[in-house]
Amino acid sequence: MKRALNAALFLLILFLGWRFLDWALVRAVWQPDPQACRAASGACWGFIVEKHRLIAFGTYPYEEHWRPGLASLLLIALWVLTALRQRWWVVAAWAAGLVVIGILMWGGVLGLPYVENERWGGLILTLLLTTFGLAIAFPLSICLALGRRSELPVIRAVCVAYIELIRGVPLISVLFMASVMLPLFLPAGVSIDKLLRAQLALILFAAAYLAEAVRGGLQAIPKHQYEAADALGLGYFQKTFLIVLPQALRIAVPPLVGTCIGFFKDTSLVLIIGLFDLLSTIKVSLNDPAWTGFGVEAYLFAAAVYFIFCYSMSLYSRRLEASAGRSLP
């Protein structure tokens, strides 16, 4: 019975897989011709070919598209370098790379025209929001996790209140507060552009969730590790950063990476405050009357892009877990 059921499921998956490949590849239209797409019986990838610049770079000036394109490649290269090499010089590479990316995106120096960040969009905006959000939220989350386990009542209460408050409201509410309420608390004449406000909201939101993942790792450390550190005469900071925290972060790799993957996908919510990330630019592209009706291909493409990045994070998580398993006693 089990063999028959497995065989039937296998044949069903094979049949559906072939039908999908036949529609997506064999009978697909790759030329950016709406009329040919409407006459064809397969997928219309010509929509992506026609709109790929808007999807990748948003409303960035057309003649300057090489700049966000180069910035995207540089950012992805830094991610890959970090995954392959955990060395001290990777930090220096990130510092130099982010400076170059800032120069490329903003311009105003080296003969590059200045481009305000209101015109940033598409895939490069998603990558930038994710990179800066996680880079700043992660150390903040460690401080929050340590503060929540602090023996000082005031620090513990502040950290608990912050974590529970942020985790108790949806990200959309945090984005709205950053977009609408934050300017009300600023001094007269001081303003923060909406990209920075969105980035701050994403950082504060991600930090609360990452803090709980780190706290879980801290609570998983056996009590004798603390006792051994105390027996060696180590102070609080030595005990925390040399003994406890490295082990806790290894244990917390799966939930940390899971939170990072969720954060990468949550960047699509910045649309509600007027920023156009990867998914938002695809939605805008579908408003073109010539390409109305090709939403299936558009969202399949968006799903493929998100899957590639999220699955890459998942593979990196497995590599980190395997490395941590070899290094743990």
Image (cartoon, rainbow, N blue to C red):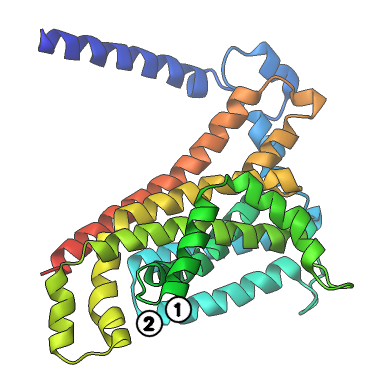
Q: Position of residue 76 (x, y in %)?
A: 50, 60
| Quadrant of image for the N terminus | top left
Q: Position of residue 157 (x, y in %)?
A: 46, 67
Residue sitting at x 42%, y 77%: 90
Q: Residues within 10 Å of mark 1 (few under 14, many from 20)?
A: few
| Quadrant of image for the C terminus | bottom left
Q: Is residue 28 above or below residue 181?
A: above
Residue sitting at x 24%, y 16%: 10
Residue 69: tell me if it is visible.
no
Q: Amino acid at mark 1?
A: Val
Between 203 and 322, the residue placed more toward the observer is: 203
Label 1: element kind: helix
Q: Is residue 318 above or below residue 238?
A: above
Is mark 2 in CB contact (under 8 Å) with mark 1?
A: yes
Between 132 and 285, the residue placed more toward the observer is: 132
Q: Residues within 10 Å of mark 2 (few under 14, many from 20)?
A: few
Q: Which residue is mark 2?
A: 88
Between 142 and 135, the residue placed more toward the observer is: 142
Q: Which residue is mark 1?
A: 91
Residue sitting at x 67%, y 51%: 175
The numbered disc on residue 306 is none
Q: Position of residue 6 (x, y in %)?
A: 18, 14
* Residue at the farthest bottom position: 233
Q: Position of residue 277 (x, y in %)?
A: 66, 47
Residue sitting at x 27%, y 67%: 248
- What is the number of callouts on the image? 2
Residue 33: tell me if it is visible.
yes
Residue 89 quadrant: bottom left
Alpha carbon distance from label 2 to label 1? 6 Å
Q: Amino acid at mark 2?
A: Trp
Q: Is residue 237 left or right of residue 292?
A: left
Q: Is residue 275 left or right of residue 163?
A: right
